[in-house]
Each structure stands twice: as structure tokens, then as C-alpha cells.
Image: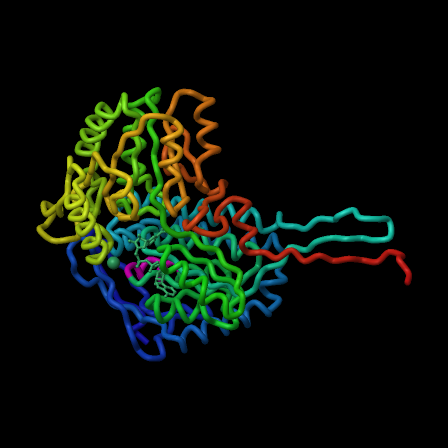
Amino acid sequence: MSDLFVELTAPNGRKYSQPRGLFINNEFVASKSGETISSVNPADEEEICTVYAAGAEDVDIAVAAARKAFKDPSWRDLDSTVRGDVLYKFAQLIEENKEILATIETWDNGKPYLVSLNDDIGEVTSTIKYYAGYANKIHGQVINTSPAKLAYTLREPLGVCAQIIPWNFPLAMAAWKLGPALCTGNTVVLKAAEQTPLSVLYLATLIKEAGFPPGVVNILNGEGRKAGAALAQHMDVDKIAFTGSTVTGKEIMKMAAVNMKNITLETGGKSPLVVFDDADLDQAVKWAHIGIMYNQGQVCSATSRILVQEAVYDKFVAEFKDHVLETSVVGDPFKDESYQGPQVTKAQFERVKAYIETGKSEGATLIAGGEPHKNVSGKGFFIAPTIFTDVTDHMQIYREEVFGPFVVISSFKTEEEAVERANDTSYGLGAALFTENITKAHRVARHIEAGMVWINSSNDSDVRVPFGGVKQSGIGRELGEAGLEAYTNQKAVHVNLGTRL
Ligand code: NAI
Ligand code: MG
């Protein structure tokens, strides 16, 4: 079965054995149809390899494996401390394999290697460890009602959980979903994004060694419309958790209705970053840069819409532009000095280019970027960091999620106007605000319609703190204690201690 692995040498010289199969029941297998998808390196547009893609039949097999594993007491009824130990072991194996995982992530996704290594893999291990610690701290309550009754609750796993993840943080998004699902005793079928199929397959090689029984964690690649839709519609899947576009999130919601699946959705955003005239401008500039340019601008909670109070508008724009041009070094993602790699795919590259044309035709002022960056090797999906100013509320580039190194800046007069315009969007994921006035900061934080508010920072995320959106940015929360709610039912037990009829 040698075609289930391929020997590869990554651009940084690292040699390794890349799995190509579907990971079901702790084994790699070929897809029933033999269909594959091609994985491309966005930095040079060359194919890395192909991997097997699941169809509906493979999804059925994976779901059946997860169902069987859920019924099996060897996982569900495992002593909760021991279940935590399996997750700790998994985190330890990830740590031991971090260079190889980071190499694959960078090769397939295009994000800088040091970011993959320190941020993404760091996020993976901290998330798995955090939820490993929760495994033996999840319990119900005793609820006092009357002397004739004992009422208590049990926290129970949901069952078979399908998890559909995106391409912008493949391993980190897998960890955000696996951690809480597994520590609570569920079983999982996870589908990676077709743009970045490789790193999760390597992650799968660590599952068996960590000690998960067969069928507890199944990992598939496959197209959204085939494998993803098959999971969302499956009658034997109890829950679906999704991260991706708002459009796909809505489709998943509809499909999940067939058997009323529990759902968690984490979708798009057009998050505002508001700079008041009493802000520490130097800090506002630096955080605003990270807030939009990190990860090639491919972040759901990116603060892509900057609103600056009139009195400091010109100064902010000038300093922000200088800082972006100086700091956002576009280059080979395997070089240490690169801050920004290529966009993940040609489709995303074309999408950002199209928004650049839209911005120009809408009459916004282009002050930086606005074109592909061709100085790396002449190839690859690189885009020069792009800034539009004098952007007004009706413009498409002000309203729609671009998902690239692309930011719009607009000015406002009053606090009231800032809040109203920050909220004038169908999205509600994050919002950042900069002011040295503590009262104003908390007042505005309350009035902003968003799942997360950053005061004097942007996109500060922590595994211990809930992450998620309101409005069309999603349903439910990931991370923190709140992340456990998404994977447990509360069963109420009423014990009659003497009420006789
Ligand atoms: P997408 O939402 O279509 O894909 C995300 C995941 O959903 C992938 O695993 C995909 O295979 C799966 N999927 C797609 N169609 C499906 C279906 N009908 N049923 C079940 N699963 C399905 O996003 P796409 O097309 O890759 O990117 C388009 C835009 O979406 C981006 O430009 C960006 O604006 C947004 N996006 C947001 C992300 C976030 O972190 N919230 C991540 C990725 C994309
Ligand atoms: Mg790729």
C-alpha cells in the first residue's frame, strides 16, 4: 500500500513521509472512488502531491467508525483523568514533531515558517493541553428544589461530531475543534480544507501513538460540496462545527436541519478598528498593522476597516503607511525575514486583485500596494500590502470581507458616529478601539456589536478566553470554558424522594 505515503523533500530541505490517505479507524486508506485532490505550494505554484479525497461512501465509513467508537466503553466511559492523559500525550507528540508540522504548514499554506512554528504549532499544543486539563473537571450540578426530591445534571458528550475546518490556520483550527470535542468524550470526523490537505494528515499519524482508540478521531480530505456536504447532511452525525465563509455557513445550517444537528459556526467578518483622537497613536499604528496584515490578511477576525477620528486622521494614515511599508516584508515564507508570504491559492489571489480594482473604480484613494508582488521568484500568489483611504460607507471595499493584506481607512467626527458606523455591518466578530480614556473605552466596548472587543490591541486571542461572533459572524463559542458547552448536553435527572400519588 505504498501509495498511501509519499517521500517528500520540502523547500527547507526537510525530508519526510507524507501520508496521502483518509485516516479512518487509526489507519490510512484510499478513497473508494480513487479520487484525489492536488495540493499546491502557493509560493511557486508547483504541485506538492495529491491526496485521496473522500466521497459520500467514504464519509459513511468514517461516520460508522466514529459511531462504533462512541458506543464503545473504551472511550466514552474511560476514566476522565485517563482521557486527559491521552490528550496530554497527543500534545507532547505534536511538540516533538513541531518542526515537521510547521514545515508542512508553510509549504502548503504559504504562511511564514517562524509563524507556523511559534504561533500555529504553539496554539495547537496550548489548546490540546488546555482541554486535556478540562477532561477530569467537567461535571454537573445538584439543584436544590424541595426535600422530597433530588435533582441533578449530568454533562454528557453529544456523540459523533463532524468538524469542517478552513485553510487559513489548518492545524490550529483542527486543535480548536478536536480539544473540546475529545476531552468531553465525543468522537470525531474532521474534514480539512481542500486548499491545505497536508498538515492534518501528518497530525493524524500521531493519533494512534497518543493512545486514542480506533475510530475516535477520523480525518478526511475532500471537497466541501462532496465530503463536507455529506457530513452536514448525514443522519448519523450529531453535531457539526464549522469555520469558514458566511455563505457556506448558511448552507451548512440548512443541511444540518435534516436531523436537527447541534451546530457551531464561526464565519466571516469586517471587523472595525476605531482610533479616537486621545489614543496612543504609535501603539494604534502597530496594532492596526498586525490586526490586518498578519497571516496575509487571511484572518476571520482581522480588523480590516479602520475608522480614525478627524483630528488625528492625517497623522495616523501617514504613520500607518510608513509602518506597513517598513514592516510587512513580502518574501519567501521559508526565509526568516519574511513577514508576509503568498495568498493561499490562485482563487484567493484573484479575489484580492478583484477587490483592488473595485476599490479603484469606487473612487477610494490607493496609497500603498494595489498590485501583485513579483519580486520573490517571479511566481507565487504574493500581493503587496494594500491600503485604501478616503473610503466611504457605501463602497463594496468598506462592506465586504476581502481576506487579504487589504485595509480600508475612513474618518469620523464623534464617538456616537464611530459606534454607529462600527456597527453598520452584517458581521459581528471582533472590534478594536484605541483611547487613553478608560471610561470611554468601556462605554464603547459595551455598545459595539461583536463577539470580541480589543481595547488598545487587536486580534489578541487566548485559548482560555471565548472566541466567536454575533450577527452573521457565527453561532456559539470556541475556546475557554465556553468551548465545552458546544460539545456537551446537560441531562437533568429527577429523583423522587417521597412524593407519593
Ligand atoms: P468555504 O467556507 O467555502 O470553505 C471552508 C470549509 O468549508 C472548507 O473545508 C470547505 O471544504 C468546506 N465547504 C465548502 N463548501 C461546503 C459545503 N457546501 N458543505 C460543507 N462544507 C463545505 O471558504 P472558501 O471558499 O475556502 O473561501 C472563501 C472566503 O471565505 C474567503 O475569501 C474568506 O472570506 C472566507 N473564509 C473565512 C474563514 C474564516 O476563518 N472565518 C476561513 C476561510 C475562508
Ligand atoms: Mg496548498
The number of numbered discs placed on residues in the rendered structure image is 0
Quadrant placement of the N terminus:
bottom left
Q: Relative to 85, is 332 on the left or the right?
A: left
Which residue reaches farthest bottom? Answer: 33
Residue 322 painted magenta = no
What is the x, y in percent for residue 387? 20, 38
Q: Relative to 25, is 106 on the left or the right?
A: left
The magenta region covers 195-203
Say which of 400 and 69 sits in front. 400
Q: Relative to 27, is 363 on the left or the right?
A: left
Say which of 125 and 477 sits in front. 477
- Which quadrant does ligand 2 occupy? bottom left
Q: Quadrant of residue 226?
A: bottom left
| 91 is higher (above) or lower (below) than 369 | below
Q: Quadrant of residue 260?
A: bottom right
- Here the colouring is rainbow
Residue 331 seen in render: no
Residue 201 painted magenta = yes
What is the x, y in percent for residue 352? 21, 50
* Residue at image location 22% in from the left, 56% down from the top: 10
* Residue at image location 46% in from the left, 44% down from the top: 467
Residue 108 seen in render: yes
* Residue at image location 16% in from the left, 41% down from the top: 363
Quadrant placement of the C terminus:
bottom right
Name the chief secondary structure element in magenta: helix
Say which of 27 and 418 sits in front. 418
What is the x, y in percent for residue 451? 46, 42
What is the x, y in percent for residue 46? 16, 60
